[in-house]
Image: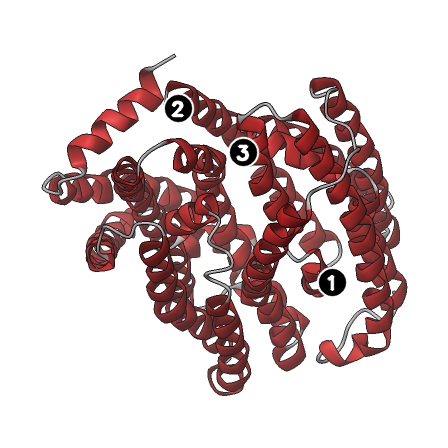
Amino acid sequence: MASRIANVKRNIIALSISRIIGLLLPFITRTVIIYCLGAVYLGLNSLFTSILSVLSLAELGFGTAMVFSMYEPLANNDCMSVCALLNLYKKIYMIIGIIIFTIGLIFIPFLPFVIKGEYPREIDIYILYLINLINTVASYFLFAYKDALLVANQRTGLLSILNTAILIVLNVGQIIILFTINNYYIYCLFMPVTTILGNIMRSIIISKIYPQYTCKGKVSDKLIDDIRKRVIGLFVYKVCDVLRFSFDSIILSAFLGLTVLAKYNNYYYIMNAVAGTMAIVSNSITASIGNSIIKESQEKNYQDFNKIQMIYMWVAGFCTVSLFCLYQPFMNLWVGKKLMFDKFTMSFFCIYFFVNRWGDICYAYRQGAGLWWQDRIRPVVEAIANISLNILLVQRIGVIGVLLSTIIGLVFINMLWGSRVLFKHYFTDYKQLYYIKRIFLYTLVTFVACWVTDKMCMVMSKDAIGNISQIVMNICLCCCIPNVLFLIIYRWCPEFNDVKNLLFKLLVRK
């Protein structure tokens, strides 16, 4: 238990530092693109990213399945089994790289059909797409399989530091290119160059840390069957995740154009940046949850689940309130009124953010318990529902239709059905209804906190001079009001004292 807490604490610290850097640099790069090249270029960049995310479905989820398969042999110091898994992983990734590149080439003739209206005619979208495609497949041929060793050994913090170093080189280099040369081709070419060099560097470091693990040996037929089942389950997870954002972007580009897509992605970027910061927690504890599920009782894991869920939803509530009160003044300061949505549309981004956080800890426990096969049908239904509602609603209510379709899927399919899988196949001695009641309690309290804080912000910011003054005022109110409300209400929950003890262990224990 002590070692798991130490690993979680170390990973959270490292991931937090990396995340701050990972937020600032891409944000600066997006800003430079908007002011140096224009919103259409930003929309085009987002479109290529979304298309290639769909193509990356060929990865099928092998990475996560391999990490899960490594938990037990690593816990038992079974070096031969780890080496055999690594060897299998390497071969699979080579095949995946070839598949993605081939499908990517086949998609080239269809590029004009996913762009509505005008795009910069001085650039060749086919050349830019090929550059982005090469950047996507490069990692599959260059040692990406070795990352599984760090993740399975609960060293996600180190992996994040290595990836952040690569991110710094990429974004700083791209910013310099935009300011000096102002050439979009060279800006894009810098991505695959950085990816290739970064993969080589990461491979050398991982090999020095774990020299005992090399690609050799053969995995047993039984384990291959287990991995195949997990991969099938994970594939539908990936389909759901990709369709949730990538197809949203493709549909917005096809129906509403690149400028609207750029506006949408600016809002989504801020929302996703906050979500990514929260993911530091869920990513840091996933390996520890897998370890705990193997070694601890169901009762102990259920108690931990409720404690972690309360902490996570408290933070999610605070972040939702902050987004609701800070989104518009920040966007006005950053990109100006021409690239802003109205407050009503903005509120749907906040709902999207909070509802998406409902299932994060539940998902982390499903991952830790390896329940991908048991959960294989749910993501398929969610993906189909999301695409169908997207196409139907975007033509009637525009951007809100895209957001609303995703929210509906998250509420009725992701949370309700997803938690059912966890309680049916792992927390079998406990009732799902208690979990659902807690989720709706957290939602109600967060809604009240948003309403109260927003009213206070409107009252207090009347005398604010300029956007910066208003943002500072709103930040102060967001830090105080929701947390006081949460403390007053949540202190009556039975998990509250256990949460205090867990936080004490994480924050104080050395």
- Which residue is at the front of the view, 338 or 125? 125
Question: Left or right: 16 with respect to 410?
Answer: right
Q: Where is residue 422 in the image (x, y as percent from the top left)?
A: 36, 54
Q: Which mark is residue 48?
A: 1
Q: Residue 92 carries which label?
A: none
Q: Can you tell which of label 1 and label 3 is closer to the viewer?
A: 3
- Which residue is at the front of the view, 50 or 287? 287
Q: Can you tell which of label 2 and label 1 is closer to the viewer?
A: 2
Q: Which amino acid does label 2 sit on?
A: Ile
First in sequence, mark 1 or 3: give its number: 1
Q: Which part of the image, by quadrant, shows the C terminus?
A: top left
Q: Can you tell which of label 2 and label 3 is closer to the viewer?
A: 3
Taking 58 as reference, is 183 above or below it? above
Q: Which amino acid does label 3 sit on?
A: Glu
Name the secondary structure under disc 1.
helix
Q: Which residue corresponds to mark 2?
A: 5
**Callout 1: few (<14), some (14-19), or many (20+) C-alpha neighbours within 10 Å?**
many
